[in-house]
Amino acid sequence: FDTIRISAGYQGLDLTSTAFSPRYVTDFEDTYGNSFGDIVVSASWRRDSRNKILFPDSGSLQSIAMESTIPGSGLEYYKLDYTQQQFLQLTKDLTLGLKGRLAYGDGYGDFEAIPFFENFFAGGIRSVRGFEDNTLGPRDEFGEAIGGSFLTVFNAEIIFPVPFAEAANSTRLSAFVDVGNVFTDVNTFDAGELRYSAGLAGVWASPLGPISVSLGFPLNAKDGDDEQKFQFTIGTFF
């Protein structure tokens, strides 16, 4: 089935930098100011053909999301986000899960790029496991990750039930490979900067909501990357 959502609203923002703020923050304020009022319009489309919401073994899930300020707003930018997830039953107990995400943002009018606080981030249990949440990609002069306007992530996993478990209907394990990173913009994309990881993950559909855990091992970490092999999240499926 298809789901379409459209919304609009007002967004006010005031920035306050200090002498310790990163250069990209002070440069932004010097160029564009520090107080903004925007009308933000967002729209999304989602198509779900999975055979089950909980642990599907066939079908797909697609979504496209768009967000943009209207012309004349204090900030003029747009963002696009596309996700495709596919499930293929290999055997009675084995399912191949594939997921890809592409996201891009840019400015228009007097704005050359999306504002830094609208950047995309990569790393963590929902993107490239084995790396700390939101730590991949460009960094500022203090070594802190700042995200970017172009994100690409791909995940592949073999999903299977927990052997001999009494709660087999509410748990799943998987062996996964993740690939991805975030870049300043689409022109700075470099396949050599993509990060890879592999490992094992598990999901338990608990009474309080889904609990996901992973044990991921970075395969090509570079100097400065923040690794985090064990990760977990509560309240959402991967």
Image (spheres, rainbow, N blue to C red):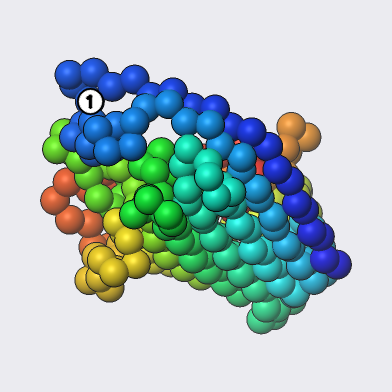
Q: Residues within 10 Å of mark 1 (few under 14, many from 20)?
A: few
Q: Residue furthest bottom?
A: 90
Q: Residue at x 49, y 65 (%)?
A: 102
**Residue that protrudes farthest toward the front in the picture:** 72
Would you identify the image quadrant in which residue 21 lies? Answer: top left
Give the answer, above or below, for where 91 lies relative to 108. Answer: below
Coordinates of residue 3 in the picture (x, y in percent): 81, 60
Q: Look at label 1 and name its amino acid.
A: Ser
Question: Which of these two is toward me, 176 or 143?
Answer: 143
- Where is residue 45? Give x, y as percent: 73, 62
- Judged from this view, the residue extending furthest toward the right is 1
Q: Is residue 20 above or below residue 189?
A: above
Q: Is residue 93 left or right of residue 193?
A: right
Q: Which residue in the structure is indicated by mark 1?
A: 21
Q: Residue at x 70, y 78 (%)?
A: 89
- In percent of the image, x 36 and y 42: which residue is there? 116
Q: In the rendered image, which quarter contains the N terminus?
A: bottom right
